[in-house]
Amino acid sequence: MTKQQQGQLVIIGGAEDKKGECKILRRFFKLAGGRNAHIVVLSTASSDPHAGIQYQRIFNDFGAEQVQVFAIQNREEAASTQFCDSLKDSTGIFFTGGDQLRITGILGGSVLGGELLKSFERGAVIAGTSAGASVMSETMLVGGLDDATPSKEIIRMAPGLGLIKDVIVDQHFAQRGRIGRLLTVVAHNPYILGIGIDEDTAIVIDGTEEFEVIGSGTVTVLDGRQVTHSNVSESSPDQPLALINVKVHILPSEYRFNLYERFVTMPAK
Amino acid sequence: MTKQQQGQLVIIGGAEDKKGECKILRRFFKLAGGRNAHIVVLSTASSDPHAGIQYQRIFNDFGAEQVQVFAIQNREEAASTQFCDSLKDSTGIFFTGGDQLRITGILGGSVLGGELLKSFERGAVIAGTSAGASVMSETMLVGGLDDATPSKEIIRMAPGLGLIKDVIVDQHFAQRGRIGRLLTVVAHNPYILGIGIDEDTAIVIDGTEEFEVIGSGTVTVLDGRQVTHSNVSESSPDQPLALINVKVHILPSEYRFNLYERFVTMPAK
């Protein structure tokens, strides 16, 4: 990862707890300012205009001062300036699940998309679950086969929001058997760190070079920098991948990973 | 892996091609002596007494001189000496799929089980698919959850046939999302090499320290010797696993892996 000033991100593997302790959603709420938070729920990923409502209720229940849902459904709405003023005051922006291509296809290059990047730069915390997690990186996975032997044809990638550099995030990771597709991503460019996030699990980046794991599952880190051989450049799309010497870490709650130096920090005893 | 004289093994990840080129089954047939082969199909893993018949037909079609099916269904049959004489002459023994616990529970410690080990020692090639693959190692996986976050409660292990040392084999690997359970095995004892074999894929061990990959999928090798930390000894059964620094190789057809020195050899160009 290129050394840089990090923003605040909460990247969630989908299916986060919404009825119990709500550890992940509460962490976002707290980072966004707690009771003083001004939260915008962006449900663009979903074609259901009501997809953001459940999150609005939850953040209201936590006691957030102001929670708005932007159910932006097309580029016309994303071009309007009416939503921008609200974003300017926001302390937290939450992307729901759905289809990551809707997020970039509708917001990418729009007035609202620009305001979103400005909000991140001025320090608003950005969270996303499922599709909202995938979209965080510069290049994102937009689709792929689950439980599949790694090969080039099992994945599709596209440009994401670029809020986190030099990584690709996959979600519902263990639950949908997605290591094959994330290994395929790493084979395409071993410089890129693969981060596979289980359901009800998240990584939190809080202005430092590290992420912290929270939630009930694990985060799988695929580090390909020491890969000594792969057949990705000469193989046909359906040919099984060869990939030698990938370093893997399985990290549960409270473990930290330094994105720049690529090392793990264990929880304090 | 302890350095030793290796026998001949064909360990198959299940669902091998039975109608097309039959690459894997033909390799076994060839190793067993081709037209001069005397093959015994052992369908003990299955409670269906006819489970071996399809393999008998296939090996007969290949032109094998003699193919017998032993549908041993209980320890009484395994204690009888009637099957032993046939095993003594066999050049290849093929374990069908089913339940690996039936293989060890019925054959383990029996007269027939003893003869099986002798056959391996005198050079007969032993093949096994699915359950018949799992059973090859000293300790085997007998069950576990697919598509699951690694934790101790997602796997169960038991003593296997011990034909291959210092490894644990898992099958239907990519197709059933089993890396979580194989990582959990490696966490239990990082000395043990995890070998995950996809469907219609096999490793062939032909008297050397190496295995060769054949078939249409990949073999995933998990090497835990450089693991710097895990929480396996202190975690509760349902607690997500922490495991840092596992080395992973993805190996398609024609790639070789040295089990003793743990390095990959690429196919000759």
Image (spheres, coloured by chain):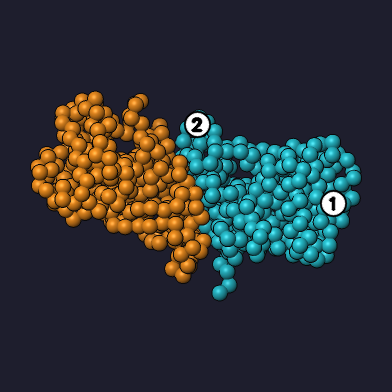
Chain colours: A orange, B cyan
Secondary structure category for the residue under label 1: helix
x and y percentages locating residue B256 in the rendered image:
60, 63
x and y percentages locating residue A23 in the rendered image:
33, 30
Tell which tag, 1 or 2, sits nearer the viewer: 1
On the same chain, marks 1 and 2? The answer is yes
Rate crowding at label 2 as few (under 14), some (14 to 19) or many (20 or more) other CA atoms within 10 Å: few
Q: Nearer the viewer, residue B107 or B263?
A: B107
Indicate the chain on which mark 2 is placed.
Answer: B
Q: Nearer the viewer, residue B54 or B86?
A: B54
Quadrant in which the C terminus of chain B is drawn: bottom right
Q: Nearer the viewer, residue B219 or B199?
A: B199
Q: Looking at the image, is mark 1 or mark 2 earlier in the sequence? A: 1
**CA distance separating discs 1 and 2:** 44 Å
x and y percentages locating residue A54 in the rendered image:
27, 31
Residue type at mark 1: give it. Leu
- Which residue is found at the position 21% from the left and 41% from the top? A71
Which residue is labeled 2 in the image? B238
Which residue is labeled 1 in the image? B87
In the displayed structure image, the side of residue B70 where residue B187 appears, left or right: left
Question: In the displayed structure, would residue A85 be above or below residue B255?
Answer: above
Which image quarter: residue B16? bottom right
- Which residue is found at the position 75% from the left and 64% from the top? B62
Which image quarter: residue B37? bottom right
x and y percentages locating residue B182 in the rendered image:
55, 45
